[in-house]
């Protein structure tokens, strides 16, 4: 069943210039509405970051997750996304982030757990072509023998599902732990205690540049799913996203929704 | 009051609240779990609000489960996991009260 459902759609690829964290939050939000309403084709969007950010999950508490003072000291913007899951630490070039926005029919009949694994099958395949044996670790991680590679989150609205993923390319773990409060309770079942200086599974395992890894991922998506037409955001999309970024995602009311 | 519980193989649930006149108040449930629709988080918070601090874990869990009903979907945690986090917060408070000689 796996590839046939993807072939039902004419996939659009968006890989724009670096954008502000709040604009990325807004683009996910409005594309979910647009795909749900049939105004926008199913899309794979690869993110480029204009600046460092902490991206919190929808249900996380700001003060429990983020050291706001440390974030401010390092010029790191703190934003909240529309999906659940955990906080991510982003610096331009340190991660590969992408969103898939699709009609719900893509994951029709699947459990939540199955839908996560299904929407990243192509990534597991892309990693395999790069020599990384990776697999899905329920609920929402892509992992490998050298450790966790990526974390996914989904949000559903209307007739559409958003599935977005952040993969660790070369993360400065020291900086990350300065701004993220990763409690002992959270790590209680992980079995990892060693203090790593870098979390760099993609860089160290492939020896390839970040852009080359992204290129391989795009090629793999296209090969497995039939189509992936490069496209650009329309002026109308950008304009709406900027308004949404300003009026929702940049506001303290949203960021501190759960103080 | 603050309590946390990481579901083995699942997600983290965090509760923050105060106790007023022996009842839970200003409840905030948070964590890295998933919940559809997102507005169901308020349903969970409201369900726990006002419960007597002496309630059993079972009672906390049942109240959350009943309030959610069958439509909202909770992934990575369960009503029982929320109850464990609440219990841990209450136990930590009781230990502090004991240590302070107020109990």
Image: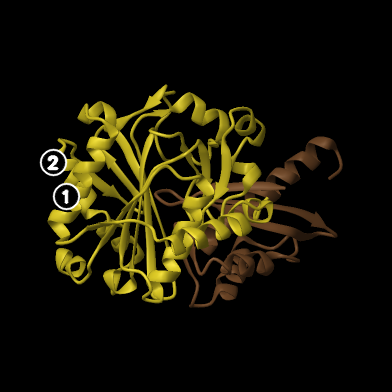
Chain colours: A yellow, B brown
On the question of residue A192 being in view, the answer is yes
Looking at the image, residue A51 lies above or below residue B45: above
Q: Chain of mark 2?
A: A
Q: Which mark is residue B96?
A: none
Task: Residue lying at the far front in this picture: please name it.
Answer: A235
Mark toward the start of the polypeptide (2 vs 1): 2
Q: Do the residues under discs 2 and 1 have CB atoms within 8 angstroms? A: yes
Specify few, some or many for label 2: CA neighbours under 10 Å numbering under 14, 14-19, or 20 or more.
few
The number of callouts visible is 2
Q: Which residue is mark 1?
A: A220
Residue at (54%, 56%) from the top-left corner?
A242
Residue A131 rendering spot, x and y as whole percentages: 15, 35
Q: Nearer the viewer, residue A221 or B24?
A: A221
Q: Given the image, what chain letter belongs to the residue carrying mark 1? A: A
Write down the residue under mark 2: A129
Q: Is residue A184 above or below residue B21?
A: above
As helix, strand or loop, the secondary structure at mark 2 comes to: helix
Residue drawn at (51%, 46%) of the image: A21
- Asked if residue B77 shows in the view, the reply is no
Which residue is nearer to you in this view: A193 or A52? A52
Q: Secondary structure at mark 1?
A: helix
* Quarter of the image that includes the N terminus of chain A: bottom left
| Residue at horizontal 32 percent and vertical 39 percent from the top | A149
Picture quadrant where residue B24 is located: bottom right
Tell me the residue at 16%/50% (across/down): A220
Measured as percent of width and height from the top left, residue B18 is found at 77, 53
Q: CA distance from mark 2 to mark 1?
A: 9 Å
Q: Left of B27 or right of it: where is A87? A: left
């Amino acid at each position: 069943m796996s590839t046939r459902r993807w072939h039902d759609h004419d996939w659009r690829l968006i890989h724009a210039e670096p954008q502000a964290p709040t604009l990325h939050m807004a683009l996910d939000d409005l594309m979910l509405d647009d795909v749900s309403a049939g105004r926008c084709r199913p899309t794979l969007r690869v993110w480029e970051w204009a600046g460092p950010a902490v991206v919190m999950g929808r249900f996380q508490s700001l003060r429990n997750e983020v050291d706001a003072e440390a974030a401010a000291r390092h010029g790191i913007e703190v934003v909240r996304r529309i999906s659940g899951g955990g906080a991510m630490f982003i610096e331009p070039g340190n991660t590969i982030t992408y969103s898939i926005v699709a009609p719900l029919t893509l994951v029709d009949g699947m459990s939540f757990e199955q839908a996560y694994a299904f929407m990243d099958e192509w990534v597991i395949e892309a990693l395999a072509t790069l020599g990384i044996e990776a697999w899905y670790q329920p609920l929402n991680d892509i992992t490998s023998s050298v450790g966790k590679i990526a974390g996914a989150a989904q949000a559903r609205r209307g007739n559409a599902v958003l599935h977005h993923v952040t993969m660790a390319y070369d993360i400065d773990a020291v900086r990350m732990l300065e701004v993220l409060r990763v409690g002992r309770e959270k790590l209680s079942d992980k079995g990892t205690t060693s203090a790593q200086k870098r979390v760099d599974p993609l860089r160290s395992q492939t020896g390839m540049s970040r852009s080359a890894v992204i290129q391989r991922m795009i090629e793999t998506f296209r090969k497995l799913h039939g189509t992936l037409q490069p496209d650009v955001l329309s002026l109308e999309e950008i304009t709406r996203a900027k308004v949404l970024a300003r009026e929702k995602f940049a506001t303290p009311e949203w960021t501190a929704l759960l103080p | 009051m603050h309590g946390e519980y990481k579901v083995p193989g699942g997600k983290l649930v965090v509760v923050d609240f105060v106790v007023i006149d022996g009842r839970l108040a200003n409840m905030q449930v948070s964590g890295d779990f998933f919940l559809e629709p997102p507005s169901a988080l308020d349903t969970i918070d409201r369900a726990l609000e006002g419960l007597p601090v002496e309630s059993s874990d079972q009672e906390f869990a049942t109240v959350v489960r009943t309030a959610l009903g069958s439509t909202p979907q909770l992934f990575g945690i369960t009503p029982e996991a929320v109850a464990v986090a609440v219990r841990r917060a209450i136990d930590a408070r009781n230990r502090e009260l004991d240590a302070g000689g107020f109990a």
